[in-house]
Structure formats: structure tokens, C-alpha cells
Amino acid sequence: MKRTILVDARFPACPVRNVLARLCDKWTLLVLYLLERSEKGTLRFSELKQAMPDISQKMLATTLRTLEEDGYLSRTLFAEIPPRVEYALTPRAEALRPILEELLAWAMENMDAIITDRSKARANLAPDSENTERKEDKR
């Protein structure tokens, strides 16, 4: 789901399209995980960026804004120079904690097998085939 869309017009009652699509994008779960693991319960933008070196500043800002819009994060701006902003989980995000922990445990338990299956699937692709048919489909 695009971050600018409030509700999927074709499927307004679908929780997968209207909630989980935004929650399960590339960066959201990682941001929630980092905030959950934070010792002080808050993280600054720069701390999040440092913990996620492969995310652009723009994408991190967009992800944080989306999480705030959806009520998963609170954003506290301190009137200092330079300005300081801290992010913390809201009670809504705290309610996700056991689910995130289970999902992470499942991912860690299954990661090696999933990576192996991906490698096997890619090895089955014919590298010279223009329509990327699988080798077993050609038999």
C-alpha cells in the first residue's frame, strides 16, 4: 500500500491491505524492533540511522512519519539548538511486542532453510532463457 493512501478504495475493510501492508514494509518492522530493544525506550533519528546504515535519510523520515501517523510511535521535539527529536513506542506498538518477538524467533529459526530454498529456486532458473522458464518446466 502506498504510504500516501489512507484506505484502499477498492477494499476498505481489508486489514491486510489497510494495516499490514504498511506495517510489514521493508523498514517498519526493523524500526519497531530497534525501538523495542532500546534500553532507554527512546531513540533519536541519528541513532536509528546509525543502526540502519543501509536506509536513506528520506526513507527513514518517511517510515517514522508513517509509524507516527498510524499511532505506533510518539515523536517528542525538544526546543534545543540543534533541535532534538526522540521517538518512542506507543501502547499500540507495545501491544505488538509479543507478536514481533514470535515473528523474529520464527525468522531466525527458519532463515537458513529459506535462504537455501531461494538458492535452489534460483539455480533452477535457466540463465539463458528469455522467458525465465524453470528447468523442470522444460522437461
Image: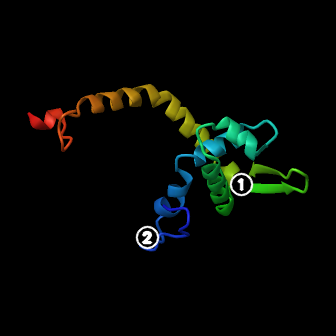
The residue that disc 1 covers is: 73
Cα–Cα gap, marks 2 and 1: 26 Å
Q: Residue at x 63, y 36 (%)?
A: 53
> Mark 1 or mark 2, which is nearer the start of the sequence?
2
Q: Nearer the viewer, residue 37 or 95?
A: 37
Q: Residue at x 53, y 68 (%)?
A: 5
Q: Residue at x 50, y 34 (%)?
A: 107
97 lies above or below 124: below
Q: Position of residue 78 (x, y in %)?
A: 88, 54
- The answer to whether residue 9 is left or right of residue 123 is right
Provide the secondary structure element on which disc 1 rests.
strand
- The answer to whether residue 94 is left or right of residue 54 is right
Tag 1: amino acid: Leu
Q: Residue at x 18, y 42 (%)?
A: 130
In this view, which residue lies farthest toward the right?
Answer: 80
- Give neighbour class at mark 2: few <14, some 14-19, many 20+ (Cα, 10 Å): few
In this view, which residue lies farthest toward the left?
Answer: 139
Q: Position of residue 7 (x, y in %)?
A: 52, 70
The residue that disc 2 covers is: 11
- The answer to whether residue 44 is left or right of residue 139 is right
Tag 2: amino acid: Phe
Q: Position of residue 30 (x, y in %)?
A: 61, 42
